[in-house]
Image (cartoon, rainbow, N blue to C red):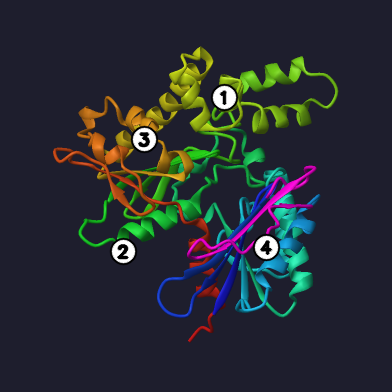
Amino acid sequence: MHILVINSGSSSIKFSLFEADKGEPRSLYEGEVTGIGGSTSRFKFRDASGRDLSGGRAEVKAESSVEAIGLVVDAVSGAGLPKFEAVGYRVVHPGPKLDRHVRIDDAVMKDLEEAVEFAPLHDPAVIAVIREMMRRFPNVGHYACFDTVFHETMPAAATTYPIPVEYREPGVRRYGFHGLSCESIVRQLRAENGIPFPRRMVIAHLGSGCSVTAVVDGCSVDTTMGLTPTGGVVMGTRPGDLDPGLVLFLLRRMKGDGASALERILNHDSGMVALSGMPNDMKAVRGAVVKDDARARLAVEIFTRSVKKAVGGFIALMGGVDAVVFAGGIGENDARSRAEILGGMESFGISINSALNEATGDAIRRLNASDSAPMVFVVPAKEDWMIAVHVGRMARPQN
Protein backbone atom coordinates (compact mmCIF):
# COMPACT_ATOMS: atom_id res chain seq x y z
CA MET A 1 0.00 0.00 0.00
CA HIS A 2 1.17 3.51 -0.81
CA ILE A 3 -0.08 6.40 1.31
CA LEU A 4 0.10 10.10 0.50
CA VAL A 5 0.34 12.25 3.64
CA ILE A 6 -0.58 15.92 3.44
CA ASN A 7 0.38 18.26 6.26
CA SER A 8 -1.03 21.67 5.40
CA GLY A 9 -0.78 24.99 7.19
CA SER A 10 -2.19 28.43 6.47
CA SER A 11 0.61 29.22 3.99
CA SER A 12 2.37 25.91 3.36
CA ILE A 13 1.78 22.29 2.42
CA LYS A 14 4.21 19.51 3.26
CA PHE A 15 3.64 16.15 1.62
CA SER A 16 5.15 12.67 1.78
CA LEU A 17 4.57 9.42 -0.10
CA PHE A 18 4.97 6.31 2.06
CA GLU A 19 5.17 2.61 1.36
CA ALA A 20 3.26 0.75 4.07
CA ASP A 21 3.10 -2.90 3.07
CA LYS A 22 5.18 -4.59 5.78
CA GLY A 23 6.37 -3.32 9.13
CA GLU A 24 6.58 0.41 9.75
CA PRO A 25 5.79 2.86 6.90
CA ARG A 26 8.80 3.92 4.85
CA SER A 27 9.05 7.37 3.26
CA LEU A 28 9.79 7.23 -0.47
CA TYR A 29 9.28 10.86 -1.53
CA GLU A 30 8.67 14.15 0.23
CA GLY A 31 8.26 17.81 -0.61
CA GLU A 32 6.65 21.08 0.28
CA VAL A 33 5.03 24.20 -1.13
CA THR A 34 5.72 27.31 0.95
CA GLY A 35 4.67 30.95 0.68
CA ILE A 36 1.16 30.07 -0.47
CA GLY A 37 -0.80 33.24 -1.15
CA GLY A 38 2.30 35.35 -1.69
CA SER A 39 3.64 36.84 -4.90
CA THR A 40 6.05 33.92 -5.25
CA SER A 41 5.83 30.46 -3.72
CA ARG A 42 8.63 27.92 -3.26
CA PHE A 43 8.47 24.27 -4.27
CA LYS A 44 10.63 21.32 -3.18
CA PHE A 45 10.36 17.65 -4.10
CA ARG A 46 12.92 14.93 -3.42
CA ASP A 47 13.24 11.17 -3.03
CA ALA A 48 14.34 9.32 0.09
CA SER A 49 18.00 9.69 -0.84
CA GLY A 50 17.62 13.47 -1.11
CA ARG A 51 17.74 13.60 -4.91
CA ASP A 52 16.00 16.72 -6.21
CA LEU A 53 12.92 15.89 -8.30
CA SER A 54 11.51 19.41 -8.58
CA GLY A 55 12.54 19.71 -12.22
CA GLY A 56 13.98 23.17 -11.67
CA ARG A 57 10.66 24.57 -10.42
CA ALA A 58 11.99 26.17 -7.25
CA GLU A 59 9.67 29.17 -7.68
CA VAL A 60 6.04 28.49 -8.50
CA LYS A 61 2.66 30.20 -8.50
CA ALA A 62 0.35 29.17 -5.68
CA GLU A 63 -2.10 31.90 -4.77
CA SER A 64 -4.37 29.52 -2.84
CA SER A 65 -4.19 26.17 -1.09
CA VAL A 66 -6.20 24.64 -3.94
CA GLU A 67 -3.64 25.87 -6.47
CA ALA A 68 -0.85 24.56 -4.24
CA ILE A 69 -2.40 21.11 -3.93
CA GLY A 70 -2.48 20.96 -7.74
CA LEU A 71 1.32 21.25 -7.68
CA VAL A 72 1.48 18.43 -5.15
CA VAL A 73 -0.75 16.20 -7.27
CA ASP A 74 1.37 16.85 -10.36
CA ALA A 75 4.52 15.95 -8.41
CA VAL A 76 3.28 12.67 -6.90
CA SER A 77 1.59 11.60 -10.16
CA GLY A 78 4.79 11.80 -12.18
CA ALA A 79 6.06 9.02 -14.41
CA GLY A 80 7.60 6.14 -12.48
CA LEU A 81 6.04 7.04 -9.13
CA PRO A 82 3.75 4.52 -7.43
CA LYS A 83 0.03 5.22 -7.29
CA PHE A 84 -1.28 5.94 -3.82
CA GLU A 85 -4.26 4.03 -2.43
CA ALA A 86 -4.99 6.31 0.52
CA VAL A 87 -4.50 9.93 1.60
CA GLY A 88 -3.96 11.03 5.18
CA TYR A 89 -4.35 14.63 6.35
CA ARG A 90 -3.03 16.29 9.50
CA VAL A 91 -5.93 18.27 10.97
CA VAL A 92 -5.06 20.51 13.90
CA HIS A 93 -8.45 20.73 15.61
CA PRO A 94 -11.35 18.25 15.25
CA GLY A 95 -13.75 20.17 17.47
CA PRO A 96 -15.80 18.47 20.20
CA LYS A 97 -17.40 15.69 18.13
CA LEU A 98 -14.36 13.80 16.80
CA ASP A 99 -12.11 12.08 19.32
CA ARG A 100 -10.26 9.60 17.08
CA HIS A 101 -8.63 9.43 13.66
CA VAL A 102 -11.30 8.69 11.04
CA ARG A 103 -12.02 7.96 7.40
CA ILE A 104 -13.56 11.08 5.92
CA ASP A 105 -17.17 11.05 4.74
CA ASP A 106 -19.88 13.69 4.48
CA ALA A 107 -20.67 13.52 8.21
CA VAL A 108 -17.00 13.99 9.13
CA MET A 109 -16.72 16.94 6.75
CA LYS A 110 -19.73 18.53 8.44
CA ASP A 111 -18.06 18.09 11.84
CA LEU A 112 -14.82 19.61 10.50
CA GLU A 113 -16.69 22.63 9.14
CA GLU A 114 -18.26 23.15 12.55
CA ALA A 115 -14.82 22.87 14.19
CA VAL A 116 -13.51 25.90 12.28
CA GLU A 117 -14.64 28.21 15.10
CA PHE A 118 -12.14 26.44 17.37
CA ALA A 119 -9.22 26.86 14.93
CA PRO A 120 -10.07 29.55 12.36
CA LEU A 121 -6.43 30.00 11.33
CA HIS A 122 -5.60 26.32 10.91
CA ASP A 123 -8.63 24.29 9.82
CA PRO A 124 -10.01 26.22 6.79
CA ALA A 125 -6.90 25.59 4.68
CA VAL A 126 -6.87 21.85 5.30
CA ILE A 127 -10.63 21.60 4.69
CA ALA A 128 -10.14 23.26 1.30
CA VAL A 129 -7.32 20.83 0.51
CA ILE A 130 -9.41 17.81 1.56
CA ARG A 131 -12.33 18.88 -0.61
CA GLU A 132 -10.08 19.39 -3.63
CA MET A 133 -8.32 16.04 -3.15
CA MET A 134 -11.62 14.19 -2.70
CA ARG A 135 -12.84 15.79 -5.93
CA ARG A 136 -9.70 14.73 -7.79
CA PHE A 137 -9.51 11.24 -6.27
CA PRO A 138 -13.06 10.08 -5.48
CA ASN A 139 -12.11 6.38 -5.47
CA VAL A 140 -9.26 6.72 -2.97
CA GLY A 141 -9.74 6.51 0.80
CA HIS A 142 -9.27 9.84 2.59
CA TYR A 143 -8.43 9.93 6.32
CA ALA A 144 -8.21 12.71 8.92
CA CYS A 145 -5.61 12.43 11.69
CA PHE A 146 -5.90 14.89 14.55
CA ASP A 147 -3.24 16.56 16.69
CA THR A 148 -5.54 16.26 19.70
CA VAL A 149 -6.23 12.51 19.86
CA PHE A 150 -3.09 11.62 21.82
CA HIS A 151 -4.28 13.93 24.59
CA GLU A 152 -7.70 12.24 24.96
CA THR A 153 -6.18 10.32 27.90
CA MET A 154 -5.83 13.49 29.98
CA PRO A 155 -8.03 13.47 33.09
CA ALA A 156 -10.88 15.93 33.59
CA ALA A 157 -8.72 17.85 36.07
CA ALA A 158 -6.37 18.65 33.17
CA THR A 159 -8.98 19.41 30.51
CA THR A 160 -11.63 21.44 32.37
CA TYR A 161 -11.60 25.23 32.35
CA PRO A 162 -12.88 27.01 35.49
CA ILE A 163 -15.58 28.96 33.62
CA PRO A 164 -19.41 28.72 33.83
CA VAL A 165 -20.73 25.34 32.69
CA GLU A 166 -22.88 26.80 29.92
CA TYR A 167 -19.70 27.83 28.10
CA ARG A 168 -18.01 24.49 28.66
CA GLU A 169 -20.91 22.45 27.30
CA PRO A 170 -20.37 23.36 23.59
CA GLY A 171 -16.90 21.81 23.77
CA VAL A 172 -14.80 24.51 25.39
CA ARG A 173 -12.02 22.58 27.13
CA ARG A 174 -8.30 21.98 26.94
CA TYR A 175 -7.61 19.72 23.95
CA GLY A 176 -3.82 19.86 23.63
CA PHE A 177 -1.86 19.73 20.38
CA HIS A 178 1.36 18.33 18.88
CA GLY A 179 -0.18 14.95 19.70
CA LEU A 180 1.06 13.28 16.51
CA SER A 181 4.59 14.40 17.36
CA CYS A 182 4.28 13.11 20.94
CA GLU A 183 2.84 9.80 19.80
CA SER A 184 5.64 9.35 17.27
CA ILE A 185 8.17 9.92 20.06
CA VAL A 186 6.52 7.35 22.32
CA ARG A 187 6.46 4.84 19.45
CA GLN A 188 10.11 5.43 18.57
CA LEU A 189 11.28 5.07 22.17
CA ARG A 190 9.28 1.86 22.64
CA ALA A 191 11.08 0.40 19.61
CA GLU A 192 14.56 1.60 20.62
CA ASN A 193 16.85 -1.23 21.67
CA GLY A 194 19.14 -0.90 24.64
CA ILE A 195 17.13 1.59 26.71
CA PRO A 196 14.31 1.03 29.17
CA PHE A 197 11.08 2.70 28.11
CA PRO A 198 10.68 5.76 30.39
CA ARG A 199 7.52 5.46 32.47
CA ARG A 200 7.37 9.19 33.33
CA MET A 201 8.36 11.46 30.50
CA VAL A 202 8.27 15.18 29.69
CA ILE A 203 8.22 15.95 25.96
CA ALA A 204 9.21 19.46 24.87
CA HIS A 205 8.16 19.97 21.25
CA LEU A 206 9.85 23.25 20.42
CA GLY A 207 9.57 24.83 17.00
CA SER A 208 7.63 27.76 15.62
CA GLY A 209 4.83 26.36 17.75
CA CYS A 210 5.85 24.99 21.15
CA SER A 211 4.28 22.76 23.75
CA VAL A 212 5.35 20.67 26.71
CA THR A 213 3.55 17.42 27.54
CA ALA A 214 3.60 15.13 30.58
CA VAL A 215 3.42 11.44 29.65
CA VAL A 216 2.92 8.47 32.01
CA ASP A 217 3.11 4.90 30.66
CA GLY A 218 3.00 6.30 27.13
CA CYS A 219 -0.21 8.31 27.72
CA SER A 220 -0.68 12.06 27.94
CA VAL A 221 -1.71 13.27 31.40
CA ASP A 222 -1.26 17.02 30.87
CA THR A 223 0.03 19.49 28.31
CA THR A 224 0.58 23.22 28.01
CA MET A 225 -1.66 24.04 25.01
CA GLY A 226 -5.37 24.31 25.66
CA LEU A 227 -8.48 25.07 23.61
CA THR A 228 -6.27 26.34 20.81
CA PRO A 229 -2.56 26.15 19.88
CA THR A 230 -2.11 29.74 21.10
CA GLY A 231 -1.67 29.02 24.82
CA GLY A 232 1.07 27.46 26.89
CA VAL A 233 4.75 28.37 26.63
CA VAL A 234 6.15 31.28 24.60
CA MET A 235 6.36 30.50 20.87
CA GLY A 236 7.70 32.02 17.66
CA THR A 237 4.72 34.27 16.93
CA ARG A 238 2.32 33.30 19.75
CA PRO A 239 2.53 34.55 23.34
CA GLY A 240 1.54 31.42 25.22
CA ASP A 241 -0.47 31.89 28.39
CA LEU A 242 -1.61 35.43 29.20
CA ASP A 243 -3.56 37.06 31.98
CA PRO A 244 -7.18 37.04 30.70
CA GLY A 245 -7.42 40.60 31.94
CA LEU A 246 -4.68 41.57 29.48
CA VAL A 247 -6.80 40.25 26.60
CA LEU A 248 -9.73 42.37 27.83
CA PHE A 249 -7.41 45.37 28.17
CA LEU A 250 -6.22 44.96 24.57
CA LEU A 251 -9.79 44.65 23.28
CA ARG A 252 -10.74 47.88 25.02
CA ARG A 253 -7.79 49.67 23.41
CA MET A 254 -8.64 48.52 19.88
CA LYS A 255 -10.97 50.21 17.46
CA GLY A 256 -13.16 48.67 14.79
CA ASP A 257 -13.11 44.88 14.55
CA GLY A 258 -11.15 44.33 17.72
CA ALA A 259 -11.57 40.54 17.77
CA SER A 260 -9.96 40.07 14.34
CA ALA A 261 -7.14 42.47 15.15
CA LEU A 262 -6.50 40.75 18.47
CA GLU A 263 -6.52 37.36 16.79
CA ARG A 264 -3.80 38.51 14.43
CA ILE A 265 -1.73 39.96 17.27
CA LEU A 266 -1.94 36.77 19.33
CA ASN A 267 -1.23 34.38 16.46
CA HIS A 268 1.17 36.28 14.21
CA ASP A 269 2.68 39.29 15.98
CA SER A 270 3.48 38.09 19.50
CA GLY A 271 5.95 35.67 21.07
CA MET A 272 9.60 35.75 20.03
CA VAL A 273 9.01 38.09 17.07
CA ALA A 274 7.44 40.69 19.36
CA LEU A 275 10.17 40.38 21.97
CA SER A 276 13.16 40.31 19.64
CA GLY A 277 11.89 42.58 16.85
CA MET A 278 13.27 39.98 14.43
CA PRO A 279 11.76 37.39 12.04
CA ASN A 280 10.64 34.06 13.43
CA ASP A 281 14.04 32.35 13.35
CA MET A 282 15.71 31.14 16.56
CA LYS A 283 19.08 30.75 14.83
CA ALA A 284 19.04 34.42 13.83
CA VAL A 285 17.93 35.48 17.32
CA ARG A 286 20.77 33.46 18.85
CA GLY A 287 23.17 35.20 16.46
CA ALA A 288 21.88 38.57 17.64
CA VAL A 289 22.47 37.55 21.26
CA VAL A 290 26.13 36.89 20.42
CA LYS A 291 26.27 40.45 19.05
CA ASP A 292 24.96 41.74 22.41
CA ASP A 293 21.45 42.59 21.18
CA ALA A 294 19.49 43.28 24.39
CA ARG A 295 16.06 42.58 22.88
CA ALA A 296 17.20 39.25 21.46
CA ARG A 297 18.75 38.27 24.80
CA LEU A 298 15.54 39.07 26.67
CA ALA A 299 13.49 37.11 24.10
CA VAL A 300 15.63 34.02 24.60
CA GLU A 301 15.52 34.35 28.39
CA ILE A 302 11.71 34.63 28.40
CA PHE A 303 11.38 31.68 26.01
CA THR A 304 13.66 29.32 27.93
CA ARG A 305 12.21 30.44 31.27
CA SER A 306 8.66 29.59 30.14
CA VAL A 307 9.69 26.13 28.92
CA LYS A 308 11.76 25.47 32.07
CA LYS A 309 8.75 26.32 34.26
CA ALA A 310 6.54 23.93 32.27
CA VAL A 311 9.09 21.10 32.39
CA GLY A 312 9.66 21.56 36.13
CA GLY A 313 5.95 21.81 36.86
CA PHE A 314 5.20 18.55 35.07
CA ILE A 315 8.06 16.78 36.85
CA ALA A 316 6.46 17.84 40.14
CA LEU A 317 3.01 16.76 38.88
CA MET A 318 4.28 13.25 38.04
CA GLY A 319 6.33 12.92 41.23
CA GLY A 320 9.57 12.71 39.29
CA VAL A 321 10.71 11.98 35.76
CA ASP A 322 12.49 9.17 33.94
CA ALA A 323 13.20 11.06 30.71
CA VAL A 324 13.06 14.53 29.21
CA VAL A 325 12.68 14.55 25.42
CA PHE A 326 13.32 17.42 23.03
CA ALA A 327 11.73 17.50 19.57
CA GLY A 328 10.81 20.04 16.87
CA GLY A 329 13.04 22.45 14.98
CA ILE A 330 14.42 24.17 18.08
CA GLY A 331 14.32 21.13 20.31
CA GLU A 332 16.24 18.99 17.83
CA ASN A 333 18.75 21.57 16.61
CA ASP A 334 19.40 24.22 19.26
CA ALA A 335 21.86 22.89 21.84
CA ARG A 336 21.90 26.21 23.72
CA SER A 337 18.14 26.10 24.31
CA ARG A 338 18.33 22.54 25.60
CA ALA A 339 21.17 23.43 27.98
CA GLU A 340 19.44 26.57 29.26
CA ILE A 341 16.11 24.83 29.79
CA LEU A 342 17.67 22.00 31.80
CA GLY A 343 20.21 24.20 33.58
CA GLY A 344 19.65 24.23 37.33
CA MET A 345 17.59 21.02 37.34
CA GLU A 346 20.20 19.07 39.30
CA SER A 347 17.72 18.89 42.18
CA PHE A 348 15.62 16.64 39.91
CA GLY A 349 18.71 14.56 39.20
CA ILE A 350 18.98 15.89 35.64
CA SER A 351 22.30 16.79 34.06
CA ILE A 352 23.43 16.68 30.45
CA ASN A 353 26.72 15.81 28.80
CA SER A 354 27.89 18.97 27.01
CA ALA A 355 29.68 17.09 24.23
CA LEU A 356 26.66 14.89 23.53
CA ASN A 357 24.40 17.94 23.60
CA GLU A 358 26.54 19.75 21.02
CA ALA A 359 26.63 16.73 18.68
CA THR A 360 24.26 16.61 15.71
CA GLY A 361 22.27 13.90 13.96
CA ASP A 362 18.82 13.02 12.67
CA ALA A 363 18.13 9.93 14.80
CA ILE A 364 17.40 9.36 18.49
CA ARG A 365 20.27 10.79 20.54
CA ARG A 366 20.86 10.43 24.28
CA LEU A 367 22.27 13.56 25.93
CA ASN A 368 22.31 12.96 29.67
CA ALA A 369 25.49 12.75 31.71
CA SER A 370 26.48 9.36 33.12
CA ASP A 371 25.47 10.40 36.65
CA SER A 372 22.02 11.68 35.57
CA ALA A 373 19.26 9.36 36.78
CA PRO A 374 16.66 10.75 34.34
CA MET A 375 17.53 10.20 30.70
CA VAL A 376 17.59 13.12 28.25
CA PHE A 377 16.89 12.51 24.57
CA VAL A 378 16.57 14.30 21.28
CA VAL A 379 13.96 12.43 19.25
CA PRO A 380 12.87 13.56 15.76
CA ALA A 381 9.22 14.55 15.53
CA LYS A 382 7.75 12.26 12.85
CA GLU A 383 4.22 13.55 12.45
CA ASP A 384 3.86 12.49 8.80
CA TRP A 385 5.17 9.01 9.58
CA MET A 386 2.69 8.75 12.45
CA ILE A 387 -0.15 9.72 10.10
CA ALA A 388 0.99 6.99 7.69
CA VAL A 389 0.90 4.49 10.58
CA HIS A 390 -2.69 5.41 11.42
CA VAL A 391 -3.87 5.54 7.81
CA GLY A 392 -2.30 2.16 7.11
CA ARG A 393 -4.17 0.71 10.08
CA MET A 394 -7.51 2.24 9.07
CA ALA A 395 -7.20 1.48 5.36
CA ARG A 396 -6.35 -2.23 5.66
CA PRO A 397 -9.28 -4.67 5.63
CA GLN A 398 -10.23 -5.67 9.16
CA ASN A 399 -10.23 -9.39 9.93
Q: What type of secondary structure mainly makes up the magenta span? A: loop
Q: Which residue is drawn at 48% across and 64% down?
A: 49
**CA gap, disc 4 and disc 3:** 35 Å
**CA gap, disc 1 and disc 3:** 28 Å
Nearer-N-terminus badge (4/2): 4
Residue 4 appearing in the image: yes
Nearer-N-terminus badge (1/3): 1
Q: Which numbered circle lies on residue 335?
A: 3
Q: Mark 1 points at which residue?
A: 242
Q: Residues within 10 Å of mark 2 (few under 14, many from 20)?
A: few
Q: For the residue marked with disc 1, what is the amino acid?
A: Leu
**CA gap, disc 1 and disc 4:** 47 Å
In-front residue for pair 80/328: 80
Q: Which numbered circle lies on residue 216?
A: none
Q: For the residue marked with disc 3, what is the amino acid?
A: Ala
Of badges 1 and 4, the one in the foreground is 4
| Residue 71 screen position, x and y as percent | 73, 62
